[in-house]
């Protein structure tokens, strides 16, 4: 039986998001309307779940599908329906595509990139300290993940001024064509002359073995490039900002691995709730039953503050352990780049802490400018001094 508050339909987003804050209304909803009916600006109504257990169920249970949403007028915050490549698939198509790239992103393979990540980070910090102050976003948080994903995929870093804008419109779904056309150019080059980067391997998987369609090839590689730096770049900037403002400084290198997990838990990166899952059968969650054919949003940021799982959930506790956060997703769509993201975050925060242990904000907190209108939360610039 549903509790009466569940019948109330709330307009979503509840309020306009501010910086890295999570609206306290989530605490209320998690307790009083665990299966909350919401009306989105486009595409109608859906359910919203906010409890850790329910969020994990929706993300892992095969009675929830992404493919069932394709071609529908899905509930969403943006006017256009956003094609999401892999995130629009269910097994076996999803498994087929993930298998093609999973080998590149395993913990062991990614670990081999650590030395390179340290070199790139050290060079960037060397350049930063040549001046009295710096912009942590433009000088480190953005170029580090761009360099890493470009080298892995085989995308020329020098093309960065072109593809950064295209990656943003690709991620919001506003316009996917420019990035797809750019990737088509790089794919064409590999058909002339093969390369031993990930893009080369994907072209071979297509041309030599027919393991994916041309559209899948372009979408997958564009998605890896865009997801490969936009996310981590914002998370690095947001993490440094959070440590400087919550803790008054960086954490020592030995605490960096647990701090990275805690920052993935506490800081909402997505501007709004992501992609809905569609129930293909009736499923009972803690707040009631979702009927077959209904859409559900699993709110990871709200789940990451569920007091049933996290003690003192709004506090940044860099020693928190265990930390079963869902900041990198859960289940079959669990972040493919999770190990790479962790590596980059760890290297960036540890190297900064070693080289500039006295790092502090270089401008008043209130004067900082936050990005708006994108899929992710992040700072336009983060002035720092040391
Ligand atoms: C701090 C950095 C990152 C965060 C917080 C993050 C978060 C996430 C989350 C939450 C999901 C699941 C979305 C859902 O279930 O609706 C996801 C999926 C994905 N991520 Fe990441 N990500 C990060 C970095 C990366 C990087 C570096 C790459 C690429 C190398 C990447 C590639 C992907 C891909 C391809 C998917 C889709 C997987 C699928 O649909 O099966 N991500 N990410």
Image (tube, rainbow, N blue to C red):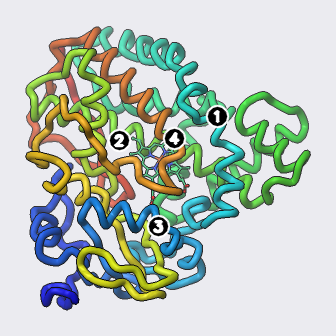
Question: Is 106 positioned to the left or the right of 155 in the image?
Answer: left
State the separation of the CA atoms marked 1 and 4.
9 Å
User: How far across and down, in percent of the image, does residue 7 sit?
Assistant: 20, 91
Any part of residue 125 in sight: yes
User: How far across and down, in percent of the image, does residue 252 sit?
Assistant: 21, 16
Return the residue at label 2. 234
Secondary structure at badge 2 equals: helix
Q: Are marks 4 and 2 in contact (CB under 8 Å)?
A: no
Return the residue at label 3. 61
Mark 3 or mark 1, which has the lower sequence index? 3
Residue drawn at x 68%, y 63% as measured from the top left: 92
In front here: 262 or 115?
262
Mark 2 or mark 3, which has the lower sequence index? 3
Secondary structure at badge 3 equals: loop
Q: Is mark 2 within 8 Å of ligand 1?
A: yes
Q: Is mark 4 within 8 Å of ligand 1?
A: yes
Q: Which mark is residue 243?
A: none
Locate the N terminus by quadrant.
Answer: bottom left
User: How far across and down, in percent of the image, does residue 96 sit?
Assistant: 71, 55
Return the residue at label 4. 337
Q: How many marks?
A: 4
Mark 4 or mark 2, which has the lower sequence index? 2
Residue drawn at x 26%, y 51% as measured from the top left: 268
Mark 1 or mark 4, which has the lower sequence index? 1
Return the residue at label 1. 104
State the separation of the CA atoms marked 3 and 1.
26 Å
Question: Is 77 positioned to the left or the right of 181 in the image?
Answer: left
User: Which is more foreground, mark 3 or mark 1?
Assistant: 3
């Amino acid at each position: 039986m549903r509790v009466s508050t569940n019948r109330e339909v709330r307009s979503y987003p509840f309020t306009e998001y501010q910086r890295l804050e999570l609206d306290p209304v989530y605490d209320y909803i998690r307790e009083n309307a665990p299966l909350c009916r919401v009306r989105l600006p486009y595409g109608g109504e859906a359910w919203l779940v906010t409890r850790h257990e329910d969020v994990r169920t929706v993300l892992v249970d095969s009675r929830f599908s992404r493919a069932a949403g394709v071609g529908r007028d899905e509930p969403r915050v943006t006017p256009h329906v956003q094609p999401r490549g892999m995130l629009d698939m269910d097994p076996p198509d999803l498994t087929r595509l993930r298998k093609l790239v999973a080998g590149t992103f395993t913990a062991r393979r990614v670990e081999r990139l650590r030395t390179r990540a340290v070199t790139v980070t050290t060079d960037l910090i060397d350049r930063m300290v040549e001046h009295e102050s710096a912009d942590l976003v433009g000088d480190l948080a953005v170029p580090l993940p761009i360099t890493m994903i470009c080298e892995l995929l085989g995308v020329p870093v020098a093309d960065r001024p072109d593809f950064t804008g295209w990656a943003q419109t690709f991620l919001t779904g506003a316009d996917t064509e420019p990035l797809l056309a750019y990737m088509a150019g790089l794919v064409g080059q590999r058909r002339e002359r093969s390369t031993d980067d990930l893009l080369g391997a994907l072209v071979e998987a297509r041309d030599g073995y027919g393991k994916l369609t041309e559209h899948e090839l372009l979408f997958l590689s564009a998605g890896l490039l865009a997801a490969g730096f936009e996310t981590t770049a914002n998370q690095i900037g947001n993490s440094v900002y959070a440590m400087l403002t919550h803790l008054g400084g960086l954490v020592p290198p030995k605490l960096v691995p647990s701090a990275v997990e805690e920052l993935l838990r506490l800081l909402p990166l997505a501007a709004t709730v992501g992609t809905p899952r569609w129930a293909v059968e009736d499923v009972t969650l803690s707040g009631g039953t979702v009927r077959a054919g209904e859409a559900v949003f699993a709110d990871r940021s709200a789940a990451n503050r569920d007091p049933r799982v996290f003690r003192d959930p709004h506090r940044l506790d860099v020693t928190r352990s265990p930390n079963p956060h869902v900041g990198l997703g859960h289940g079959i769509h669990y972040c493919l780049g999770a190990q790479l993201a962790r590596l980059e975050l760890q290297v960036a925060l540890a190297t900064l802490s070693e080289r500039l242990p006295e790092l502090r904000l270089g401008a008043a907190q209130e004067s900082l400018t936050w990005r708006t209108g994108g899929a992710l939360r992040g700072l336009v610039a983060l002035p720092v001094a040391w």
